[in-house]
Image (spheres, rainbow, N blue to C red):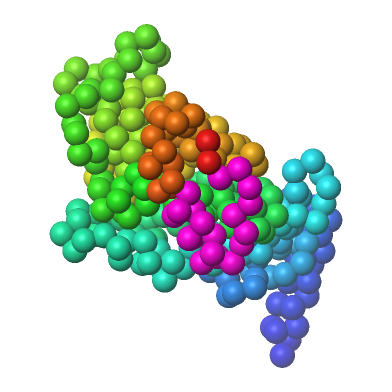
Amino acid sequence: MAGRTFHLQLHHLLLLLLSAGGAVTAAAQTCGCSAGYCCSKYGYCGTGDPYCGDGCQSGPCYHSSPGGGGGGGGVSVADVVTQQFFDGIIGQAAASCEGKGFYTRQAFLNAAAKYSGFGQDATADDSKREIAAFFAHVAHETGNLCYIEEIDKSNAYCDDSYRQYPCSPGKKYYGRGPLQLSWNYNYGPAGADIGFDGLNSPETVANDPTVSFKAALWYWMNRGVHSALSSGFGATIRAINGAVECDGGNLPEVNDRVKSYEDFCSQLGVDPGGNLTC
């Protein structure tokens, strides 16, 4: 009984310190909270401000809506991207597809943990729309997670004008991964951020499923797609493929992306919003 009382007192003290914003460096439990609980910045499961407020790592964390209006909140990406949701996409790919044995929900979740702003910095509905938009583009770019690499590998996608990201001899920077990362000026900084040699080993994006999803999310968060979504799904199409598809460039491709987006929004129970095309 005395030991249990001491444990409760210690835990209560920790909560007080957390609430006060104190710097607690005690060894934390591994995050793996039950549904409805937040994983705090110190690695403990619970509810309320000490757990779901500043620094919350996962679960129903509190997040301010853009502009400081309050009342906003992201979602648990893992709760939205369920195994059923993921399987519903990859299940449409043929059994012979190389992506069947490569792309996994866990690899996506591992990658999403690095980019905490994804699906987290707006309202719950906005977050679901972002997840729906991401997977709509992924489904389109990869044929429902069938392809790991671009079919046509003849183009090296090397732009020598980007001298800070020099192309490595013999390497090609054609599309790889869920969003078909292309060009040396994307592989270089993506690799630096993720932790692999993007210029000398671009094939890593096609060999490691977690790196593959990280590369896609890096592009999403750093190349204007994430921020474009506030202007509607059509703006994300423009951010990804610009004039190649937009302004009448390729209407069938645009319509395919929009159809997938609307379908995923329906699955997630959220309105797709306006400005769907570009």
Tell me where residue 190 sits by quadrant: top left
Q: Position of residue 215 (x, y in %)?
A: 40, 40
Q: Is residue 56 shown to the viewer in this render? A: no
- Measuring 77% from the left and 67% from the top, which residue is drawn there? 48
Q: Is residue 36 shown to the viewer in this render? A: yes
Task: Pick the residue in front: 33 or 102.
Answer: 102
Count of numbered tags: 0
Q: Is residue 105 above or below residue 84?
A: above
Tell me where residue 158 sits by quadrant: top left
Task: Pick the residue in front: 236 or 80.
Answer: 236
Q: Quadrant of the N terminus?
A: bottom right
Q: Position of residue 201 (x, y in %)?
A: 25, 31
- Measuring 71% from the left and 63% from the top, which residue is drawn there? 51
Q: Is residue 124 left or right of residue 164?
A: right
Residue at the extreme bottom of the image, as rendered = 1
Task: Pick the residue in front: 95 or 78.
Answer: 95
Q: Position of residue 60 (x, y in %)?
A: 66, 64
In the image, the segment drawn in magenta is 258-276
